[in-house]
Amino acid sequence: QDASALIDQIHAAGMKAGVAVKPKTPISTVMDLGDKMDMCLVMTVEPGFGGQRFMAECMPKVAELRARYPNLDIEVDGGIARENIDAAAQAGANVIVAGTSIFKADDISGTIESFRATVNTQQELLANKK
């Protein structure tokens, strides 16, 4: 019920705390936790099973988090592929979860490296805007 108190308990136990936001959950529900949480996961599909399509409408949540909390780890999970990694990285995601697009790739290592390079490039651009 009290996310802030739960984060305090997790930190007191010597662990890091992350908060997940489902696609239909407003980002405002976690904005006040930004200084406490170690990571925010913005789900870009409805949780439950793999292979779903990326929901680009979740990217404003990532951008809002990044604008307010420039040092927060922001993770996206769901439908991440070569066609949308740019959108996720440009919005400010610095942690990427990709399943289907990696495991079904002809070149798994190349796909991972491409995703990593995209995220790193965008993080550098965002850092230089400060």
Image (cartoon, helix red, strand yellow):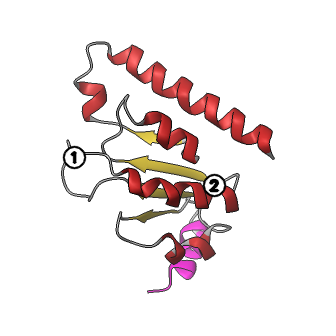
Q: Image quarter for residue 107?
A: top left
Which residue ends up furthest to the front in the rendered image?
Answer: 57
Viewer-closest of 109 and 58? 58
Q: Is residue 22 visible?
A: yes
Q: Check disc 2 and report the residue beneath it.
A: 66
Span shown in magenta:
1-12
Kindly state the secondary structure of the residue where label 2 is placed. helix
- From the top left corner, tell me how far across and down residue 13 is, in percent: 56, 66
Left or right: where does residue 104 sit relative to residue 61?
left
- From the top left corner, tell me how far across and down residue 37 is, in percent: 59, 64
Q: Residues within 10 Å of mark 2 (few under 14, many from 20)?
A: many
Instruction: Give the tally of numbered discs.
Output: 2
User: Is residue 11 rendered magenta in the image?
Assistant: yes
Left or right: where does residue 6 sit relative to residue 66?
left
- From the top left corner, tell me how far across and down residue 89 is, in percent: 54, 39
Q: Check disc 1 and report the residue beneath it.
A: 52
Dot placed on the residue nearer the N-terminal end, 1 or 2: 1
Q: Amino acid at mark 1?
A: Gln
Q: Amino acid at mark 2?
A: Arg
Position above or below: 68 against 71: below
Name the residue rendered at 20%, 45% in the picture: 50
User: Is residue 77 rendered magenta in the image?
Assistant: no
Name the residue rendered at 29%, 30% in the picture: 101
Q: Is residue 38 visible?
A: no
Q: Residues within 10 Å of mark 1 (few under 14, many from 20)?
A: some
Name the residue rendered at 43%, 86% in the picture: 1
- From the top left corner, tell me how far across and down residue 35 is, in percent: 68, 67
Query: How far is the residue under mark 1 from the one under mark 2?
Result: 25 Å
Viewer-closest of 126 and 77? 126
